[in-house]
Amino acid sequence: MNKQNTAEKFIELLEIVEKLRGPDGCPWDKEQTHASLLPYFLEEAYEVIESVEEKDWNTFEEELGDIILHVILQSQIAMEDKKFNMSDILKTVNEKLIRRHPHVFGDKKIDAAIEAKQNWELSKHKEKNRKSRLDGVPPTLPALTRAQRLQQKAAYAGFDWEQVDDIWSKLDEEIEELKSAHKNGNMDNVKEEIGDVLFSVVNLARYMDIPAEDMLRATNKKFISRFQKIEEVLEKKGKKPEDSTLKEMDEIWDMAKEES
């Protein structure tokens, strides 16, 4: 990569955004605020995720550009409001990366990636003067992602299972408690136990270093594909799902499962 050429293109993008927000700029860009851009930013982030999962690298490149655009738009608005500018952002992140990687930029020695992550979490906790080691996980995260991040933070602090068999036992215990709550007809307890089961499944994924959110998203995609196969086969027969038997749909489902 030609760093000089990259720097020039980055400066060009800064100038483009500045012009878009300027007196003779785009009406839409000019009316945007920090808050109004957030839904679009979230959409772009999910498009990045989708392009990675689809291994669509051309789209991935484009979507990363859209993310950078959003960062620059936000920094431009902040600069106009005299909060901070892009130079401040880069200075802050550069200093943070160096400070939180003493094993790379200093003389601290570590032996594994887990130690590097523990050092990062501890440094962040001290820098931000947080009370709890669980602080800093946004409540707005998807529930599965938030559960996994909370579990990771607890684990980095030493609160973790010693072996995976312990988590399997905990999951079995929570499932039995869910069954018991359902048998007793206590719906409030059922709801609570369903949450505990889900949390335990996420913990199992976390221990195996598997992102639970990504796996559920993949399963959603698989379900959609197989159900749409049911609809496709039934349509060829001139039928709809609601006009078919469960046995008939199960047979098509099994066929779709074998094909995949």
Image (cartoon, grey):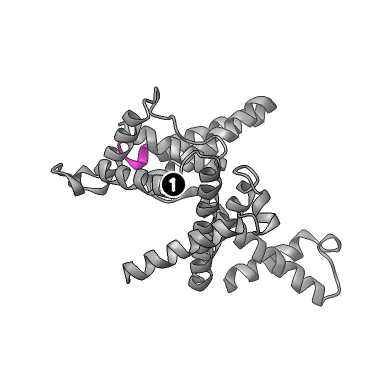
Residue beneath the point at 53% across and 43% down? 78
Residue beneath the point at 60% across and 62% down? 222
Foreground residue, 231 or 173?
Answer: 231
Amino acid of disc 1: Ala
Foreground residue, 212 or 146?
Answer: 146
- Bounds of the magenta span? 160-166
Q: Is residue 30 magenta?
A: no
- Quarter of the picture containing the C terminus is bottom right
Q: Please determine whether, in this image, residue 106 is positioned above or below residue 135.
A: below
Q: Position of residue 22 (x, y in %)?
A: 61, 55
Residue beneath the point at 50% across and 48% down? 75
Q: Position of residue 212 (x, y in %)?
A: 49, 48
Q: Position of residue 235 (x, y in %)?
A: 81, 73
Is residue 49 shown left or right of residue 115?
right
Task: Report the residue marked by disc 1.
Answer: 205
Q: How many other residues sit within 10 Å of disc 1, few (<14), some (14-19) or many (≥20)?
A: some
Q: Residue furthest front?
A: 23
